[in-house]
Image: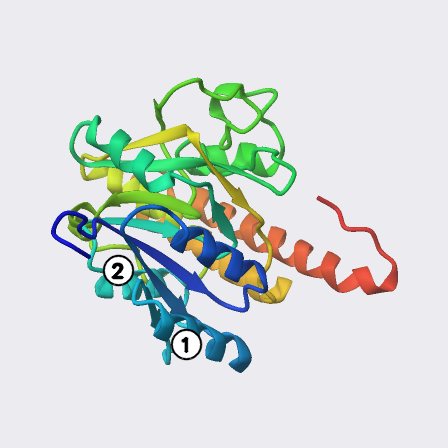
């Protein structure tokens, strides 16, 4: 990078058996007409994919390939990438998320217009352009979790967890939480709260980060004009593996963040529901080959 065109943004991407979309995501980052580096953390991919990524890194100094750790979990993988990143700003991006052209210039222009200690989230859409859950949402609490789990949002609209059914904002809005599929913030602010909590292996770490970021005095903004195609669900991890780690993540989140606000027995009941939900999803998936239909 030249003095006139310094490196300002590092993209952190953690990949585990992501599939072909990984290369689309990498290309979309490196094709941006903006000085950027991509810190790609290999949490475990087939040898052929690792070899291809190593060749790409050797051919392009902007791609920094971090491998050899095995599957250390998403949170630790993100922190590992952030430690080797050299940019003033960090963008945590899922490996199945494809950026639109001009994303980084928009991000920095918007970030510069906001108060200090801001974090930005983008509009996440699927391959058909439909808004996805999670990119704009409320604070996760035992109450919002209960309403979400039992589909009670129509009865308690102000206590919904996800806002994707609401009209898309026409401008930047402050919001309680965004998705870990796309998080943009300064390097200093990221490490001010010690990065992601590595006690989370998979899932819920983004909600925990948003909660801690806000409690530390930061503000989170949803930017509707930045659109990211998030394919989602590309990992080859089994349903059992995912649901078990998701359940552990929810339990960790609630007990660490709400033990002083909710009585212990309510959190214990919540734990029971979390594991019942995980068991139901695992059981349904196991029955699918036998001709059973999946229940949402």
- Which residue position is annotated with label 2? 82
Above or below: residue 190 compared with residue 244: above
Does residue 87 appear to the left or right of 41 in the view shown?
left
The chosen color scheme is rainbow
- Which residue position is annotated with label 1? 54
Residue, far right = 291
Does residue 76 appear to the left or right of 98 in the view shown?
left
Q: Quadrant of the C terminus?
A: top right
Does residue 237 appear to the left or right of 98 in the view shown?
right
Quarter location, residue 174: top left
Above or below: residue 291 compared with residue 154: below
Rendered location of residue 195, percent (x, y): 25, 55
Visible in this render: residue 180? yes
Does residue 112 appear to the left or right of 244 in the view shown?
left
Q: Quadrant of the N terminus?
A: bottom left
Alpha carbons under labels 2 and 1: distance apart = 19 Å
Rendered location of residue 6, percent (x, y): 17, 51
Under circle 2, the secondary element is: helix
């Amino acid at each position: 990078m030249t003095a006139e065109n310094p490196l300002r943004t590092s993209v952190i991407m953690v990949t585990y058996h992501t599939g072909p979309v990984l290369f689309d995501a990498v290309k979309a980052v490196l094709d941006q007409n903006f000085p950027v580096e991509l810190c790609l953390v290999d949490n475990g991919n087939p040898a052929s994919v690792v070899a291809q990524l190593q060749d790409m890194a050797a051919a392009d100094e902007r791609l920094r390939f971090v491998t050899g750790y095995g599957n250390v979990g998403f949170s630790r993988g993100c922190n590992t990438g952030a430690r080797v990143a050299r940019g003033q700003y960090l963008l945590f991006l899922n490996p199945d998320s494809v950026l639109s052209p001009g994303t980084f210039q928009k991000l920095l222009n918007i970030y510069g217009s906001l108060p200090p200690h801001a974090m930005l989230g983008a509009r996440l859409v699927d391959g058909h352009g439909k808004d996805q859950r999670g990119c704009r949402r409320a604070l996760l609490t035992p109450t919002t979790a209960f309403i979400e789990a039992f589909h009670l949002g129509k009865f308690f609209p102000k206590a919904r967890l996800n806002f994707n059914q609401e009209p898309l904002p026409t401008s930047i809005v402050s919001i309680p939480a965004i998705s870990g599929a796309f998080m943009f913030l300064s390097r200093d602010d990221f490490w001010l709260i010690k990065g992601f909590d590595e006690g989370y292996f998979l899932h819920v770490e983004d909600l925990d980060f948003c909660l801690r970021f806000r409690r530390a005095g930061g503000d989170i903004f949803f930017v509707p004009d930045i659109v990211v195609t998030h394919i989602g669900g590309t990992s080859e991890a089994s349903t059992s593996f995912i649901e078990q780690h998701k359940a552990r993540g929810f339990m960790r989140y609630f007990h660490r963040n709400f033990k002083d606000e909710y009585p212990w027995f309510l959190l214990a009941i919540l734990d029971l529901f979390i594991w019942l939900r995980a068991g139901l999803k695992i059981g349904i998936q196991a029955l699918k080959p036998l001709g059973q239909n999946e229940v949402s």
